[in-house]
Amino acid sequence: MAIHLQLAFVLSALAFSLVLAHTHEQTVLDAQAPATEDANANPWLTKYGKQVDLGYTGPLSFSHLDYARCLEDDSNDFDIAILGMPFDTAVSYRPGARFGPHGIRVGSRRQHGQRAYTLSWGMNPYVQGSKVLDCGDIPLNAYDNALALDQMEVAYSTLLARSVTKSEGAASQELTHIFAKDGKAHPRIVTLGGDHTIVLPILRSLNKVYGPVSVIHFDAHLDTWGYAPASGSAQSRITHGSFFHVAWEEGLMSNSSIHAGIRCKMTGEVDITGDEETGFKIVSTDDIDDLGINEVIRRIRKRIGDNPVYLSLDIDVIDPGLAPATGTPEAGGWTTREVKRIIRGLAGLNFVGADVVEVAPAYDHADVTSIAAADIIHDFLSMMMSSEPPKSRDERNPWKDEL
Ligand SMILES: [Mn+2]
């Protein structure tokens, strides 16, 4: 076993070296000119080239993207921002999602823009003409939820107001100007949560730019519970299980949203009735077996239509056997592969933003949840840059039976 592991390690290191081969060759060429006279001045550079970062080395950003503190530094433009919201003080069970942004970045370390082509998508999202930038994390107050929610809204709005990079006619889909009240193209933000409450300030911010949006909500739970607390404050009513109800009260969502992957225990039918009032329809976990993936995709697409849509994915939609590191695990969920296939089927909808929330790395094993979350975000980038779902590999390149 140890030998196999060593071999796998060597092979993966080799594969990554090959990815970097182009950069390395260029570096060697660059280094050749001064090599003879400077060989003693910098023997490393002369002999081995630049100090490149391997998958498991270097500073931490999502998929080794450029990292900028965008909230204070507006000198780096982008089309899609990766933004961390390390917030977990409105959870009902396990805290720990404040470490989600860090954990997802750790889970992304074997991802890289130079090795991002997949068989599933048939493309690399980092070479589609859109610039993706890791904009860091919002320094959120950890003691005052009202203050933290305002910080999230202000930060999101700050980035939404930046002008996009992409030139007209680039391959990626860019429709935000069609839906924006000001008629301008706005960047899209992929948020790393954070507990699910972070979606309330995000929807408040999006509402100012686009008006009400539809929501596609992957989750084991409804998150539309709007009960008044038996005791407590108005602020204590805003939690990771109630934020959609509050968003509905505030008119932030159009009446055409949909859940996917619901399987939690409820009070009874009253929860479903309340959920429908807030504008949601339900695709349950079991529907994937009863209806099949294609029908699940069709129902989501039909529900959303041409509306501007925000996609929020609670990692607990995935079975806790495959994604254990989350705040409120529910047994019997979808597989990571099933979720990824549904996401592929959603390409071409008018996404104005997306998130992965509720990753709480302290409950993880071997980064399995963080790796799933990072991989799903890779799919989000491809999804946001595609005008339609990718054809299957067999449709693109039919299998020829040699018999
Ligand atoms: Mn949730």
Image (cartoon, rainbow, N blue to C red):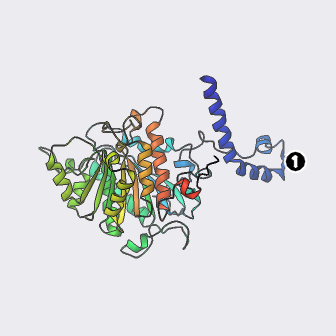
Q: Is residue 182 above or below residue 33?
A: below
CB at disc 1 and ligand 1 closer than 8 Å: no
Q: Does 61 sit left or right of 200 as displayed?
A: right
Relative vertical location of residue 118 with respect to residue 183 in this rendering, above or below: above
Q: Residue at x 50, y 51 (%)?
A: 378
Of the pair 197 and 108, the residue shown nearer to us: 108
Percent x, y of residue 230: 11, 44
Counting from the top left corner in percent of width and height, residue 353 is at: 40, 60
**Displayed quadrant of residue 98:** top left
Judge from the rendering whether residue 246 lies leftward or rightward of residue 63; answer left or right: left
Q: Amino acid at mark 1?
A: Glu
Q: Residue furthest bottom?
A: 183
| Circle 1 residue | 37
Between 377 and 265, the residue placed more toward the observer is 265
Q: Residue furthest left?
A: 230
Placement of the N terminus among the 4 image quadrants? top right
User: Can residue 227 be seen by looking at this rendering?
Assistant: no
**Picture quadrant of residue 51:** top right
Q: Judge the density around disc 1: few (<14), some (14-19), many (≥20) Cα neighbours within 10 Å.
A: few
Tell me where residue 241 appears, x and y as whole percent. 25, 47
Does residue 76 appear anywhere in the picture? yes
- The residue located at (23%, 52%) in the rendering is 224
- Residue at figure coordinates x 50%, y 68% from the top left: 164
Q: Nearer the viewer, residue 186 or 284?
A: 284
Residue extending furthest toward the front: 403
Rendering coords of residue 43 (x, y %): 80, 41
SS for callout 1: helix
Q: How many numbered circles does the render carry?
A: 1
